Image (cartoon, rainbow, N blue to C red):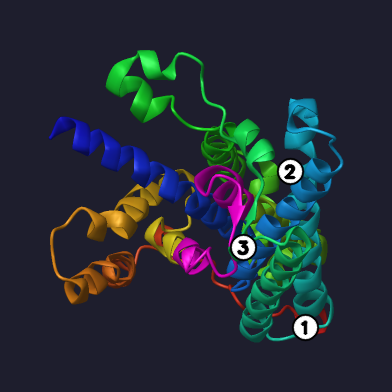
Amino acid sequence: MFSTIIAFLHRAIMQGIPLLFGSTGEIITEKSGNLNLGIPGVMYIGGMSGVIGAFVYENSLASPNDANGFLAVIIPLLASLLGSLLAGLIYCFLTVTLKANQNVTGLALTTFGTGFGNFFGGSLIKITGADVPSVALTTTSNYFRTTVPFAHTTGWFGELFLNYGFLAYAAIIIALVCSFFLKRTKGGLHLRAVGENPATADAAGINVEKSKYLATCIGSMIAGLGGLYYVMDYANGVWSNDGFGDRGWLAIALVIFAIWKPNMSILGSIVFGGLYIAFLYVPCELRTQELFKMLPYVVTIVVLIISSMRNKKENLGPAALGLSYFREER
């Protein structure tokens, strides 16, 4: 029984890491007043960009034994960050510069990102000539999945706390750093001011457009790492079209669950990860399993209702969230 609980928690944490990356990136974005519903697409683009980088590197090797650990990690990592950055810039150009509707732009970006991933994924599958509709990047993935050497010798403690790739720990560190930035730094105060009342922030000398661009682009890069983690670590380096599922939307739901606090997202990601796989551990019929798959969204709705009923300012999103800022109207 105890071993089953440890295995469940370990899998819940791994399942939650992509959500943690996505929610942390979206929280930073939303704190600037930008509602980026394109996060699922950004995560797709980040994952696919990393796959392209890994594919190019692996195919440049004469033998898998010639792989360099540093290059095997840094090339997909930089490719993922670059792809996610470009996605963030597209969103910012449309919503901040051109003042396009943020909801429509975000949904369009999600559609574009999914199409981007499936198009290039299908292209790579054709290049490899694989019998199954997937691309396997085992050599690169092994470096991303490398754990602490003594993890397996420390029993349940190692299984629960040490048996993860470096991106899992990076996700937690990034969330904590973002939380500190928002709460304890002048830059974080300026960013929150832009999200609450951009006209007042502008009058105080804060560059609203610059803040929105920086927050959204950095947030997109963080979210894109969630896609890279899923492919290179969780999925063992195997890319399958539409294999990412609805994790991007769960990441957006996690933002509400964590009440716009990156440090709360750490716990929330584990909860969501556990809820996401709960149906695998509950003996029930197939139709009942589908009900268990709804749990993350049901919990989010409950939290949203409770937060609204309490009506506390700190539990609500930025006041100007989703609204374009027109400087001439201030």
Q: Position of residue 59 (x, y in %)?
A: 82, 45
Residue 131 shows which numbered tag?
Answer: 3
Q: Give how far apart the Cα atoms at labels 1 and 2 are.
A: 31 Å
- Looking at the rendered image, the quarter that the N terminus falls into is top left
Relative to 104, is 14 above or below? Answer: above
Q: Residues within 10 Å of mark 1 (few under 14, many from 20)?
A: some
Question: Label 1's element?
Answer: loop
- The quadrant holding residue 60 is top right
Is residue 49 toward the left or the right of residue 16 in the image?
right
Q: Residues within 10 Å of mark 2 (few under 14, many from 20)?
A: many
Mark 1 vs mark 2: in front: 2
Question: Label 2's element?
Answer: helix
Residue 77 shows which numbered tag?
Answer: 2
Relative to 196, is 10 above or below? Answer: above
Q: Amino acid at mark 2?
A: Leu
Q: Amino acid at mark 3?
A: Asp
Q: Which residues are magenta?
A: 227-252
The earlier-in-sequence mark between 1 and 2 is 2
Q: Residue at x 64, y 31 (%)?
A: 143
Q: Residues within 10 Å of mark 3 (few under 14, many from 20)?
A: few
Relative to 68, is 75 above or below? Answer: below
Q: Amino acid at mark 1?
A: Lys
Please tell me which residue lies in front, 126 or 262: 126
Is residue 11 toward the left or the right of residue 167 in the image?
left
Q: Position of residue 101 (x, y in %)?
A: 68, 86
Please tell me which residue lies in front, 124 or 298: 124
**Residue carrying label 1:** 99
- Looking at the rendered image, the quarter that the C terminus falls into is bottom right
